[in-house]
Image (tube, rainbow, N blue to C red):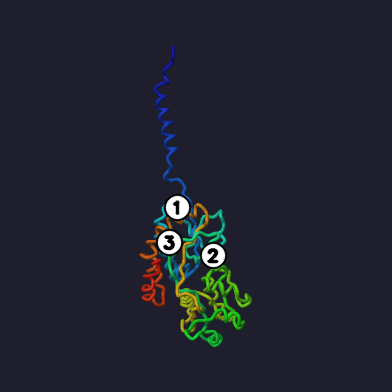
Amino acid sequence: MVNRSWWPARPCLLALLITATLFAAVPSQGQAKETLIWLLRDFPPLTIFSGPFQGQGAIDKLMPELIARMPQYDHQLMHVNRARGIQMLQDPEVFACDPTLLWTAEREKHILFSIPTYATPANGLVVEQKDHALFVPFITEDGYIDLAALLNSHTVKIGIVAERSYGPLIDKVLKTSTQDNLVLHYGNAAVGSMLQMARMGRFQAMISYWPEARFHAQQQGVPLSELEFYSVKDAPKYQFAHIGCSKTEKGREAMEIINREMRVLRTTRLIGFYAQWMAKPEEYLQDAKTFFDD
């Protein structure tokens, strides 16, 4: 006699096996996502790490909106200095992006760049008013500083941030001038630290964005009347920044999304966020109407 007592259970077992197979074939909603690391440096008024305006910088305000438009990823915000950030972007094992990067031909060899995302007033020379006489011989009739002639005169020392690009013209001048006139800063909050160093006589000027130098001066209680800013001869009025990502397949996939979203966010949100920090916000907003025409 054949024992059939197990037959009713067989269809149930088969159904369980089929269900398990189907669930295995469908990605789980809880499946781990790729983690995109956002490299942020203390770069007021774009990113502000401390003080009463912490988290109120233009890029600080942009990041939650951009991240919300990229739900495909888990996002990690990491604070780095400029040198460390560049090092991580060039590491093929790291999946990272930097939202405040100037394009250079050298960087493009290892870093993927987005469309232009914002324009900042170009870098220039920040000096203390009491040292004005040192720079008079190098100020042109229309008020610009001849940076190459100043450096080649060996009359002053100038502070700069290590691994920072100041734009093609200034970068070229710095690269081709005598390096013993330059004092490099590698730490965090570099411009704020350099402002203090300049006031202590470590050097007589520093290269910076004026909005950045103004922010640090105000935070340190330095009257703006004690500082002078000179645009560099032949440099453009504005420099365009980009988001830079790892030059890998993961980076390319993320950049497609970033470019799509920033075509909207750069005009509808970021221009307004940044204009709030300008010495002349109305002029910036007027100029911004043509920033992305091309």
Q: Residue lying farthest top?
A: 1
User: Going by the image, does 263 lie left or right of 244?
Assistant: left
In percent of width and height, residue 53 lies at 43, 70
Q: Residue lying farthest bottom?
A: 133
Residue of label 1: 73
Q: Quadrant of the N terminus?
A: top left
Residue 284, by quadrant, is bottom left
Q: Is residue 156 above or below residue 68?
A: below
Element under label 2? helix
Residue of label 3: 63
Q: Is residue 70 above or below residue 121?
A: above
Q: For the residue marked with disc 1, what is the amino acid? A: Tyr
Callout 3 crowding tier (Cα within 10 Å): few <14, some 14–19, many ≥20: some
Q: Is residue 86 above or below residue 169?
A: above
In percent of width and height, residue 79 lies at 51, 63
Kindly check if marks 1 and 2 are in contact, taking CB atoms under 8 A apart as contact.
Answer: no
Callout 1 crowding tier (Cα within 10 Å): few <14, some 14–19, many ≥20: some
Which circle's residue, 3 or 2, is located before the other in the chain? 3
Which circle's residue, 3 or 1, is located before the other in the chain? 3
User: Going by the image, does 30 lie left or right of 158?
Assistant: left
- Residue depth check, mark 3 versus mark 2: number of the one nearer the observer: 2
The numbered disc on residue 187 is none
Task: Count up the numbered dots.
Answer: 3
